Image (cartoon, grey):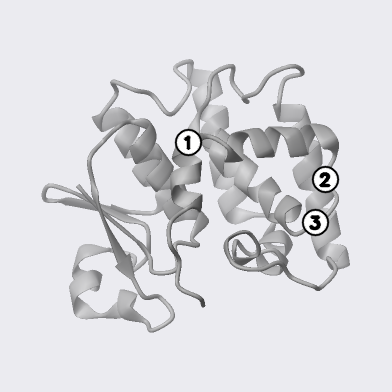
Amino acid sequence: MKLYVDSLYASPYAMSVFVALREKSLAFEMLTVDLEAGRNHETGFAKTSLTHRVPTLVDGQFALSESSAIDEYLDEAYPQIRIYPAELKARSRARQIQAWLRSDLMPIRDERPTHVIFFRPSAKALSDGARAATRLLVEAADELLPRGSEHLFGNWSIADTDLALMLYRLIANGDAVPARMEQYARSQWARPSVQQWAQLQRPDP
């Protein structure tokens, strides 16, 4: 398999698929695409990736983009180690969480991009919109995470990594997050598969 990711190793979506592959102990080659230079629109990559986006996974003759679609494909194609809950409703909830994190909370994503984790924090205070998005994120995470549990669904799932990363954008920048949510996010961040991504050597943007 081949996994195309951004050349800065900063995409939260590339990270999600990287973690999924590591958790499943699947062998893959990681290739980078310089998004800042527009290399994702050049013919070679454009022929591989339908959406011209990273991550894109190539498994034999099959190429797939969009991270949650890739995560779901990997779980069905290689079911020996699961990254989604086995129970239908829990699995559906995990997919809901992933879809929500990718389609909402834009003020947090704009004002606390993953650069604040992997490169340097932002000196700008959160806007009113970002503070409102933070409240929504924290309230939802607090409701989703059972008391006394390390994970959303009893055992770890890829939704834990995605949710923790959204929280970690704030934590890494020094923004206030309730202690329970900070503990959860830091615990998820310490997971070996996540740390393998976090410790990649990155060029200075």
Name the foreground residue: 81 vs 192: 192
| Residue that numbered label 2 is attached to | 177
Give the residue at the far bottom of this rendering: 37
Task: Provide residue 9's location: percent of width, then percent of height.
Answer: 44, 62
Note whether residue 68 is visible.
no
Using the image, tell me which numbered label, if any, was put on residue 15: none
Task: Provide residue 33's location: percent of width, then percent of height.
Answer: 33, 70
Q: CA distance from mark 2 to mark 1?
A: 23 Å
Q: Is residue 92 above or below residue 38?
A: above
Name the foreground residue: 119 vs 34: 119
Task: Provide residue 41's location: percent of width, then percent of height.
Answer: 31, 78
| Residue that numbered label 1 is attached to | 192
Q: Is residue 179 left or right of residue 54?
A: right
**Chain-order first, disc 2 or disc 1:** 2
For residue 46, what is the image quadrant?
A: bottom left
| Residue that numbered label 3 is attached to | 174
Q: CA distance from mark 2 to mark 3?
A: 9 Å
Count of marks, rendered view: 3
Q: CA distance from mark 1 to mark 3?
A: 23 Å
Question: SS for tag 2?
Answer: loop
Name the foreground residue: 195 vs 23: 195
**Chain-order first, disc 1 or disc 3:** 3
Q: Amino acid at mark 2?
A: Val
